[in-house]
């Protein structure tokens, strides 16, 4: 296949877990990570950044938590980097002043129409079939019994009881979302990540996921963002064909199929599913290997919401992949995944990408190079950048499965990590991705069962990755280098 779209690398990070605060993050980006990233996705830094869902349950989405800094600090960061921030469009914290006013005053609160209850969507009552049809990423019904204005109600809580869903049919909900978008864009944020937007379009008689109303709401947010000079990235986990279709009407989608397909290729020594994906994947994608969430499996499998459409991997391949990750991690990912820990999406495996490959430095570096060479905007998660391992102490302390991949780094840990060969090689490859003129040109790829060639070409400038997943050998070559070899499988010998 050929493609001609590219974008500079971005870092995904919690501010506190990598650098303490916004000023510290600026120092890291200008110091140890100088010249590596064009942009940074700041995971939620609103008030509070350390709630029950690591910032995705803000009580005030329009304010920077003062422990991390201020809007002026965000604006200063945007002077050097493209800044992406989350717009949490599906829910707010149950502790927010707005919802607490509803708790106190019920339907008399001016904020009451902003929040979704069972009766507001099903005023005549819901049947068993209505409830069974609702799609939820976690077990059980998406409702929590709460007392609102003295009356017991079933409040819609898709993710946790601490996150109350918005009713985007109401004007007051849109007033709220506009205030959030205005706060972000006024501080220099130019990329907005719409968190869990697929769940916003609840409609009676549907699965309440990826509905026509959700598409309308997305377009409305897109217009609000474009009016303020910002672009939009959708965060949607689902059947791979959904990403292909959605990409036609938005600025960016995630390439969530890439991580499990790369892991499948490296564990099963089989590149054919990745080749299939490269034949259809959207070019306007943000590529990832690891994120603050788990490694998505639903993105490569069949899906009840797309009956008759097979996945990129069949059920046996998916089962083998999940077991390969658990085995490679020495069982630590099993302890953090599914029913083994709280607050988890059952369609994700919680594990650092480094542990998912058994801490094999060469195969890990190859995985990162495949991502870097894939068309789109490569985003690299801070733990993955530093080749971090599963944080079992944090998991034990919090009981939250995804915390296994959310380590709190000290300055000393960062300084030591960047000199490990596997980390240094990633940094060198990211600088190449950011600076080399070949990435402004055309992309081509060729696959066999076990070998791949990925090539960017612009005039006499060229970058080529050649690899064999059977034996794990690879080389990254770039024109303009004295020996043309940027790195290969020998670059990380004696890394640990």
Image (cartoon, rainbow, N blue to C red):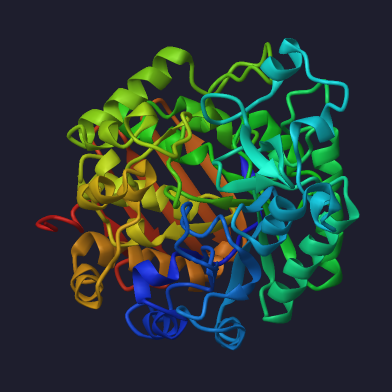
Q: Position of residue 332 (x, y in %)?
A: 22, 37
Q: Position of residue 293 (x, y in %)?
A: 45, 46
Give me the residue at 78% from left, 69% from top.
Answer: 179
Q: Give the image quarter of residue 238.
A: top right
Give me the residue at 50% from left, 70% from top.
Answer: 434
Q: Position of residue 80 (x, y in %)?
A: 55, 84
Instruction: Using residue 400 as the reference point, say whether residue 139 is left or right of it.
Output: right
Q: Position of residue 236 (x, y in %)?
A: 63, 41
Instruction: Using residue 314 as the reference point, say whether residue 388 is left or right of it.
Output: left
Q: Nearer the viewer, residue 98 or 411?
A: 98
Q: Give the image quarter of residue 419.
A: bottom left
- Where 214 sits versus 31, above or below? above
Please state, as top left, top right, bottom left or bottom right, where the C terminus lies in the image.
Answer: bottom left
Do we see residue 427 in this rendering?
yes
- Where 217 sits versus 62, above or below? above
Instruction: Using residue 106 as the reference point, say whether residue 453 is left or right of it.
Output: left
The tally of labels here is 0
């Amino acid at each position: 296949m050929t493609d001609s779209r590219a974008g500079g690398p971005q870092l995904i990070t919690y501010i506190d877990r990598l650098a303490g605060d916004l000023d510290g993050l600026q120092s890291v980006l200008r110091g140890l990570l100088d010249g590596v990233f064009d942009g940074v996705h700041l995971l939620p830094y609103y008030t509070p950044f350390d709630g029950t869902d690591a910032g995705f349950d803000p009580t005030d989405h329009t304010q920077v938590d003062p422990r991390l800094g201020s809007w002026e600090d965000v604006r200063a960061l945007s002077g050097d980097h493209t800044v992406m921030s989350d717009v949490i469009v599906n829910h707010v914290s149950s502790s927010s002043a707005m919802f607490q006013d509803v708790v106190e005053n019920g339907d008399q609160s001016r904020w009451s129409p902003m929040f979704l209850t069972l009766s507001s969507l099903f005023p005549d009552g819901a049947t068993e079939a209505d409830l069974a049809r609702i799609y939820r990423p976690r077990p059980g019904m998406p409702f929590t019994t709460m007392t609102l204005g003295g009356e017991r109600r079933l409040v819609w809580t898709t993710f946790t009881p601490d996150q109350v869903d918005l009713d985007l049919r109401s004007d007051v909900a849109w007033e709220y979302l506009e205030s959030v978008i205005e706060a972000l864009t006024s501080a220099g944020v130019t990329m907005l990540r719409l968190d869990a937007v697929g769940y916003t379009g609840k409609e009676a008689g549907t699965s309440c996921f990826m509905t026509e109303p959700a598409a309308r709401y997305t377009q409305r947010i897109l217009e609000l963002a474009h009016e303020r000079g910002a672009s939009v990235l959708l965060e949607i986990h689902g059947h791979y064909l959904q990403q292909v279709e959605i990409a036609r009407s938005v600025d960016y989608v995630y390439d969530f199929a890439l991580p499990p397909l790369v892991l499948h290729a490296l564990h099963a020594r089989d590149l054919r599913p990745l080749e299939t994906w490269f034949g259809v994947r959207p070019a306007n994608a943000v590529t990832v290997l690891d994120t603050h969430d788990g490694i998505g499996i639903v993105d490569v499998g069949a899906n009840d919401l797309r009956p008759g459409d097979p996945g990129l991997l069949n059920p046996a391949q998916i089962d083998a992949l999940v077991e390969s990750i658990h085995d490679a991690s020495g069982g630590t990912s099993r302890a953090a995944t599914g029913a083994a820990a709280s607050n988890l999406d059952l369609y994700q495996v919680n594990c650092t990408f480094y542990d998912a490959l058994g801490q094999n430095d060469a195969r890990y570096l190859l995985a990162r190079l495949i991502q870097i060479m894939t068309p789109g905007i490569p985003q690299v998660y801070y733990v993955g950048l530093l080749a971090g391992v599963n944080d079992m102490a944090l998991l034990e302390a919090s009981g939250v499965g995804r915390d296994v991949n959310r380590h709190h780094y000290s300055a000393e840990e960062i300084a030591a990590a960047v000199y490990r060969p596997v980390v240094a090689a990633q940094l060198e490859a990211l600088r190449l991705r950011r600076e080399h003129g070949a990435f402004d040109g055309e992309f081509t790829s060729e696959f066999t069962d076990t070998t791949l060639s990925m090539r960017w070409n612009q005039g006499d400038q060229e970058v080529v990755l050649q690899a064999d997943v059977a034996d794990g050998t690879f080389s990254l070559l770039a024109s303009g280098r004295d020996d043309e070899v940027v790195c290969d499988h020998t670059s990380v010998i004696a890394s640990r």
